Image (cartoon, rainbow, N blue to C red):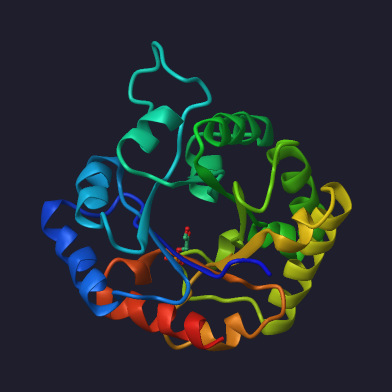
Amino acid sequence: MPRKLAAGNWKMNGCSPDLTEARRLREACPDPSVGVLICPPATLLSRLSDLLQDSPIATGGQDCHANGNGAHTGDIAAGMLADAGAAFVILGHSERRTDHAESNDTVRAKAEAAIAARLTTIICVGETKAEREAGDTLKVIAAQLAGSLPDGVTAENTVIAYEPVWAIGTGLVPTIDEIDETHEFIRTHLDARFESDTGEEISLLYGGSVKGSNAAEIFAVEHVNGALVGGASLKCDDFLPIIRALEAS
Ligand code: 13P
């Protein structure tokens, strides 16, 4: 069975005072029956990891470089994230693909580096509004999966997040049928590519305007094993209902 995971992506939000939200979450949720993850900005990663040490809540980075070290001003190597306490790293988020022109090849190289550093990667795929309207959603996702996933993928080192670009931060959410269609397509694609049970066991997350109010119906979709949550992960009071909905699913 794929592991259930509620993952928070704080994006470029959060300074020292916001660690309080993670502290509150730790206290409100000392023994979750699903995986819980917070990916803060890099500036908070080490302190957040210390704060959540000995708790079941994991931490992760939001990106890493493909190289292990060197002259790459402003970048962070996968091993540095691990050194700061991270167990996960988000890769190929649409905001990275857009803001930093990250290609599938770039994402795959980063994933190889992250896996070598023993991080679990959360690799993001998803179509733009124009691509959906053109009927290209599944074609786009297939190309992103084919290009972004390295051959060394296992259910232990990789999670896939389906995030329609047009649903991120907009309050728009695909219909349940649309979420069902894309997740089943991703599962079939993974099954066809990876040996034995890997394709069946990789966790698939949905991301894009997930909130406490819509989480339960999204988690009821067959191949949805959790969520990658942006805005609603910033506050304990908003993230906790999503975690509870996943536990109840
Ligand atoms: P929102 O939950 O704010 O729509 O963001 C989704 C996302 O991009 C998570 O990575």
Identify the residue at image location x=15%, y=64%.
20
Front-most of residues 34 and 179 = 34
* Residue 201 at x, y percent in the picture: 71, 61
Quick check: can you spot residue 3? yes
Identify the residue at image location x=80%, y=59%.
138
Q: Is residue 110 above or below residue 145?
A: above
* Residue 87 at x, y percent in the picture: 43, 47
Front-most of residues 66 and 125 = 66
Q: Is residue 206 above or below residue 124?
A: below
Give the quarter of the image for residue 204.
Answer: bottom right
Identify the residue at image location x=34%, y=18%.
73
Quick check: can you spot residue 134? no
Give the quarter of the image for residue 175.
Answer: bottom right
In this view, the residue farthest toward the left is: 17
In this view, the residue farthest toward the right is: 192
* Residue 131 at x, y percent in the picture: 73, 57
* Residue 233 at x, y percent in the picture: 35, 68
